[in-house]
Structures are given as structure tokens and as C-alpha cells.
Amino acid sequence: AVVSTQSTGAAQEIDVLRARTVRAVIDKVIALRQKDCPGHKFNSPLLHQCHHQSLLDKVMTYFDGAREQLLATPNCFLPNVLKDNEGVIEFITNFLLSITPEAIYWGGFYTNYHDEMFHPPTKLKTRTRRKRAVKAAENYEGKEDSITETIDILTQIAAETCGIDANYTN
């Protein structure tokens, strides 16, 4: 059974550890599939067989190889704080040995909660915002019809800076 992400203490740590492990399996599966894809010598995604296969099909096909790689180094995807924890490594090993490809895909071990925890949303760097604002101002000079475009760009930059929806109107 999947442990709720709303739980506390040890149960939440186990939940996060499962999510990390599932994420590592999926990353390995995708890397193995891309390695096997003959289309990577071409630019068009239409020629990449790896883009035509669903994630479930990839997991079903490449799970054993991904599991084998992760069992060889079960702490490779852990933060440094946990890398030498024998209990954590034993948990990961047992989890990898007992889980199936279907459970990886359908088990609900990795949620939006985990995705935001492991990959927090990033904001544009200030330098990038500044460059966009300067470019918008340069585009405006001598072009009266571009004032709306300039205002739109500056509004978007301000919205990103403040973390609000630029498309919001009263």
C-alpha cells in the first residue's frame, strides 16, 4: 500500500524514499531507452523511436536493466546525508527486488508533491529578466506599433518576478 504524503515522521520518510527510488528507476529506464534509440543521430523527434513509445512500454521493456544498475549502486541517487545509511540502502534494495514494472507505473509512489520536493519550480534569473526588459525597450524605440508588445513583455517579466499570473485581469 502507498503511504500518504500527508503522514508524518518515519512514514513520510519511507514515502519520500520510495518516490526517490521510483524516480531513479524511471530516469534509468529513459536513459536506457534513449541509448538504444537509433534516431538520436537525427534532429527530428519524428525519427526518434524513443518518442513513439509510451512510458509504460518503456518501463515494461527496460525495468530489469534499470533495476540491475540501481541494485549495483543503490545509493547513487540519494542525497549525501543518506548515502551511507545501511537501513536506507537495505530498504531501497528490498523495494527494488519486490516491485514490478506495473507497480512502478501505476503504484502512485511518485506524485506532484514529490516532484515539487525534488525539482522545485525555478524563477528566471534577474540577469535574464533585465536582458528581456532592455531588449523590449530597444524594440520600442522608433516603433509606435510595438508599444503593446513592449508592455506585454514587461508585464510578463513583472509577473514572473512577483510570482503572479500575468494574464489575470480584474
Image (cartoon, helix red, strand yellow):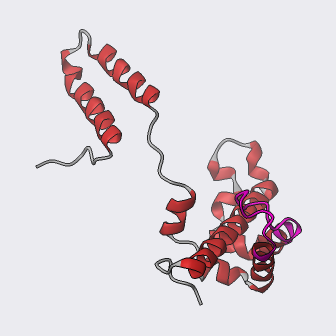
Whether residue 77 appears in this view of the structure is yes
Residue sitting at x 75%, y 62% = 28
Left or right: residue 4 versus residue 164 is right
Left or right: residue 128 versus residue 67 is left
Q: Which of the two residues, 160 or 86, is positioned nearer the viewer here?
A: 86
Residue sitting at x 50%, y 60% = 116
- Kindly report the secondary structure that dominates the magenta region of the rendered protein: loop
Q: In x, y percent, where is residue 50?
A: 70, 59
Q: Quadrant of the N terminus?
A: bottom right
Region in magenta: 68-87
Q: In x, y percent, where is residue 121?
A: 47, 51
Q: In x, y percent, where is residue 61?
A: 77, 73
Is residue 66 placed above or below 15 in the rendered structure? above
**Number of callouts in the render?**
0
Whether residue 108 appears in this view of the structure is no
- Looking at the image, which residue sits at the far right? 72
Q: Which of the two residues, 81 or 140, is positioned nearer the viewer here?
A: 81
